[in-house]
Image (cartoon, grey):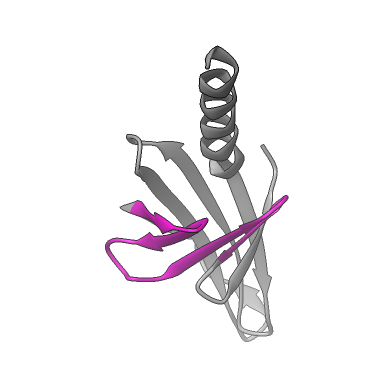
Amino acid sequence: MKNILLFLLVAGCSQTGSITGIYVKHVESEYTIGEDTVFISTANNTQFVLERHTWYQRIKNGKLSDKQMKIQHSLIDNIGNNKYQDTKTGASLVFNKQELLLGTAEYQKIQ
């Protein structure tokens, strides 16, 4: 019985720990460059906190504009079977080893 409880505790911790961390995405086109950084931390047993920092610079006539920064906060619900959903935007989140797919955007885990 103790072994089963220990297994469930370890499995639960590894599941929670597997999605928490810092994820980044670099964006670059002929019109803009930028970085998206997503911080995911534990809120409670079924939810996580998502904090998204986005900065970008527009490119106009070959020159960069001033940096623009936006910070967004929301909660992520674990909706079962390793599926997650942003409660604010409704976007789905898929975690795969060192990657995060947030909607259609791909992020790499750095920490």
Side of 78 relative to 65 (left or right): left
Q: Looking at the image, which is closer to me, 70 or 5?
A: 5
Q: Is residue 96 magenta?
A: yes
The residue closer to the viewer here, 70 or 22, is 22
Q: Taking 29 as reference, is 43 left or right?
A: left
Query: Residue 79: percent from the left, percent from the top?
Result: 38, 59
Nearer to the camera, 32 or 41: 41
Q: Quadrant of residue 10?
A: top right
**71 sits left or right of 65 in the view:** left
Measuring 61% from the left and 50% from the top, which residue is drawn there? 23
- With respect to residue 25, does 11 lie above or below? above
**Residue 71 x %, y %:** 37, 53
Q: Is 26 drawn above or below residue 61 in the view shown?
A: above
Q: Residue at x 58, y 32 (%)?
A: 11
**Region rendered in magenta:** 76-101
Residue at point 31%, 69% (across, down)? 89
